[in-house]
């Protein structure tokens, strides 16, 4: 079944393509520590079953004993998932709202307390693989958004993946693994600080992979993968990050050639790459968690961190000392805002006096040389 644009908007149904599903399930399994017992695997919003099919193939290849559990609120998608998983043993697919299937303690007690109720899925799952719906408050509708905010004790704008992250955490056993694809917004935004704080407090964070603008699938947001192990007590985290974005800043050095984005992701080196069509910049390193109120996560490679400290130590003053720094326009819908024939356009282009060079880490030196007399 092909979902209509309206359906996709309302239910957040953008299915995971197979290569990305395989990349995530392989990563997750590299962290799995089997204890000889049957592994309970859950996708709480399984759609047509792409993630369940991928993880079950890999668990099967490793000869693990496992149960597959899938929830989805849409019957048509579940029918397709049932066919996709036909022949796999121990599969249970349920048509249900996952957010109502998890028991959350009343607000009088701490929201994130452990719960063990025999009637719910709470504390029963060893491994969750998920790409929960991305639906923003405006589309959810005020009533639904308020009900979710109340149940999950959320403040501000509620995107559907926030309550999913909380509900999935309740479903996991202690020591269970979460591998989830969400929008990357929570990594950088002020409104994402409650999500960062929640993940930091509830997980040993293993890896964060910011897939940037690589357009690996047709989601309306830039995706990121979070991999963590549910923990009981807050400890210090040493988590790796990896981020990959299209290189649009005029890097002039050598590009490493790879077949596609997954080959770039899988190679151990960072740097500048091309798949023959586009150019990419990949960085990796260790996340620095800031434990102040903002819960910022800094994801800079050593080289990038050095560059920031060079700028800071050489600058008499930073722009942020005198001005409030804000993102002006940042779009994930280039097709809507930037015409494909931009380079050929003559008269319709804004006047040259209105356009400014993009100054970035990659071209700041050459920009200074070119503009030293201006
Ligand atoms: C982004 S899709 C992902 C599907 C699948 N996991 C994949 O990766 O291809 C999100 C799915 O969540 C389902 N969904 C939306 N709200 C839900 C809810 N409250 N409970 C369970 N499923 C839900 C949608 O029907 C859709 O199939």
Image: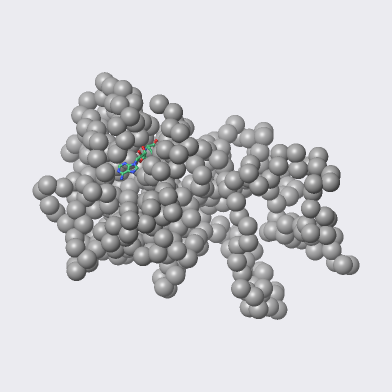
Residue 294: x, y in percent?
44, 70
Q: Is residue 258 visible?
A: yes
Indicate the colouring scheme.
one colour
Closer to the camera in the image, 182 or 259: 182
Q: Does residue 157 appear left or right of residue 125 in this picture?
A: right
Closer to the camera in the image, 215 or 257: 215
| Residue beneath the point at 24% across and 63% down | 111
Residue with the most extreme right position: 373
Q: Does residue 308 appear left or right of residue 237 in this picture?
A: right
Q: Does residue 357 appear left or right of residue 247 in this picture?
A: right
Q: Is residue 209 above or below residue 153?
A: above
| Residue beneath the point at 25% across and 36% down | 95
The image quadrant where one finds the C terminus is bottom right
The image quadrant where one finds the N terminus is top left
Ligand 1's image quarter is top left
Image quarter of residue 317? bottom right
Residue 51: x, y in percent?
36, 35
Residue 36: x, y in percent?
19, 38
| Residue beneath the point at 32% across and 59% down | 146
Q: Is residue 196 visible?
A: no
């Amino acid at each position: 079944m092909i979902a209509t644009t309206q359906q996709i908007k309302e239910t957040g149904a953008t299915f995971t393509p197979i290569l990305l599903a395989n990349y995530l399930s392989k990563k997750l399994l590299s962290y799995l520590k089997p204890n000889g017992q049957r592994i309970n695997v859950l996708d709480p919003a399984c759609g047509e079953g792409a993630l369940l099919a991928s993880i079950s193939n890999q668990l099967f290849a490793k000869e693990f004993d496992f149960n597959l559990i899938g929830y989805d609120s849409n019957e048509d998608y579940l029918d397709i998932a049932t066919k996709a998983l036909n022949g796999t043993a121990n599969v249970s697919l349920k048509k249900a709202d996952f957010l109502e299937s998890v028991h959350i303690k009343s607000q009088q007690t701490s929201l994130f307390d452990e719960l063990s109720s025999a009637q719910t899925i709470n504390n029963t799952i060893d491994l969750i693989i998920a790409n929960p719906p991305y639906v923003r408050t405006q589309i959810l509708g005020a009533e639904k958004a308020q009900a979710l905010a109340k149940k999950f004790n959320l403040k501000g704008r509620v995107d559907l993946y926030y309550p999913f992250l909380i509900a999935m955490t309740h479903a996991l056993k202690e020591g269970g693994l979460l591998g989830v694809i969400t929008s990357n917004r929570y990594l950088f935004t002020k409104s994402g600080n409650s999500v960062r704080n929640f993940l930091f407090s509830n997980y040993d964070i293993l890896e964060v992979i910011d897939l940037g603008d690589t357009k690996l699938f047709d989601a309306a947001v830039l995706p990121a993968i979070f991999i963590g192990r549910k923990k009981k007590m807050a400890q210090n985290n040493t988590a790796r990050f990896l981020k990959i974005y299209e290189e649009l800043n005029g890097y002039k050095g050598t590009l490493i050639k790879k077949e596609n984005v997954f080959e770039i992701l899988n190679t151990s080196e960072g740097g500048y790459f091309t798949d023959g069509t586009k150019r990419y910049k990949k960085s990796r390193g260790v996340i620095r968690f800031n434990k102040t109120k903002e819960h910022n996560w800094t994801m800079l490679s050593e080289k990038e961190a050095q560059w920031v400290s060079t700028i800071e130590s050489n600058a008499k003053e930073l722009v942020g000392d005198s001005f409030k720094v804000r993102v002006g326009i940042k779009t994930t819908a280039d097709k809507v805002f930037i015409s494909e024939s931009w380079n050929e356009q003559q008269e319709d282009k804004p006047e040259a006096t209105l356009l400014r060079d993009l100054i970035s880490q990659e071209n700041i030196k050459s920009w200074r040389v070119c503009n030293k007399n201006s």
